[in-house]
Amino acid sequence: MSTWIWIAAVGVSIVLNGFFAGMETGITSARRVRLVHWARRGRRGATIAAELVKHRENSVVAAVVGNNVAVVTGTALATAWAVSALGSKGEAVAAITMASLNIVFGEILPKVVFRANPESMVVSGAALFRALSLLLWPFEVVAAAAARLILLLLGQRDAGGQDSLTRADLLQLFSLSREQQELGASENRLLADFIAHSHRRVEEVMRPWEQVSRVSIHASVREVFDHVRETGHSRLPVEREDGSLDGLVLYRDLQELAPDDQITDRVRDFLRIPTWMALDEAIAALTDRQVSLAVVIGAGPTPMGIVSLEDLLEPFVGQILDEHDNPDIPNTMNGIPS
């Protein structure tokens, strides 16, 4: 066999070692909320990645098995080539060389890269990881069975594939931390609020659509400014002639326009989130899109209400002073007298 073929085969084993090591780190570090949000937006690979993180234990087993298969295969190939080329010294040379390469390029480097941006890296490698996992399925079954047997012998129950703490687990941890005074008063209060409101949905904090101030797509800048003065709301939904929602207009986007200009070119697209979405998932959705307001929809496309980032955060951190509490809107806007 050609020397270059040996080198290529060993190189592939090191790359696969790094890939599996990186995916293991990424899967254990990735936030499933963000992956689910990306999947709903249609991001390629996000659905598979969310499933991998959902079944985190099985995914980690697959990564560890793949990692070890790659290391053993690569080391065996390198040793065989080195012995044929260098004789009795080849085994030691291969062992030292492969150990160094696997530690640097198969462990340290990929884990650092995947830990820096776990969600994006897991999404990028999800399809390949699942395909390779199917090939390694027999090894994974044996490894998982051995792990369960060891846990049984040690008198520990299987985690059942759960990848997150239950509400009862969080309450127990909170109680222990308070008893042992591991957290300060403010941290205890914040954690207690988070646990208390973790089950709440967007529909509980949204502003119903019939109470939402809206403007027409044909409105002028002057009309929008008058509406802003009257309502104190600087972020307004924009309606078409048929009553459907066209987008959102922000007060700050209109300040450079003339009073009689139309707002059409300054209407922004809006984020839709369902009424049943959990508060923490909604917060992740808004921060991921870098927006502060979302339109809440039900089973169909008809708007049910709007919700701001402040609305979503207040159950966890208390009242937030926003535009509705203290509107910082001047009486004279862009030269338009009030």
Image (cartoon, rainbow, N blue to C red):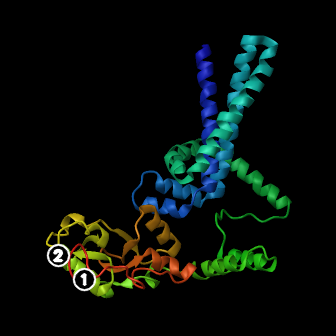
- Name the disc covering residue 328, or none: none
Q: Nearer the viewer, residue 249 or 23?
A: 249
Give x and y (percent) for residue 141.
68, 49
Which mark is first along the chain, 2 or 1?
Answer: 2
Which residue is identified by label 2?
219
> Which secondary structure lies at badge 2?
loop
Judged left or right of residue 130, residue 77 is right
Q: In which quarter of the view is residue 107 placed?
A: top right
Residues marked 1 and 2 touching at CB (< 8 Å): yes
Residue sitting farthest toward the right: 154
Q: Which residue is mark 1?
A: 227
Q: Tell me residue 251's x, y (percent).
A: 29, 73
Say whether residue 238 is visible: yes
Q: Is residue 243 visible?
A: no
Q: Nearer the viewer, residue 16 or 285?
A: 285
Location of the C terminus by quadrant is bottom left
User: Vertically, is 49 above or below 324?
Assistant: above
Question: Residue drawn at (65%, 34%), measured in percent from left and top?
Answer: 105
Question: Residue placed at 72% from the left, 28% from the top?
Answer: 98
- The residue at the point 82 percent across, 14 percent down is 88
Side of 227 where 72 appears, left or right: right
Question: What distance separates the C-alpha of mark 1 from that of mark 2?
Answer: 10 Å
Q: Amino acid at mark 1?
A: His
308 vs 228, left or right, is right
Q: Position of residue 30 (x, y in %)?
A: 58, 56
Q: Quadrant of the N terminus?
A: top right
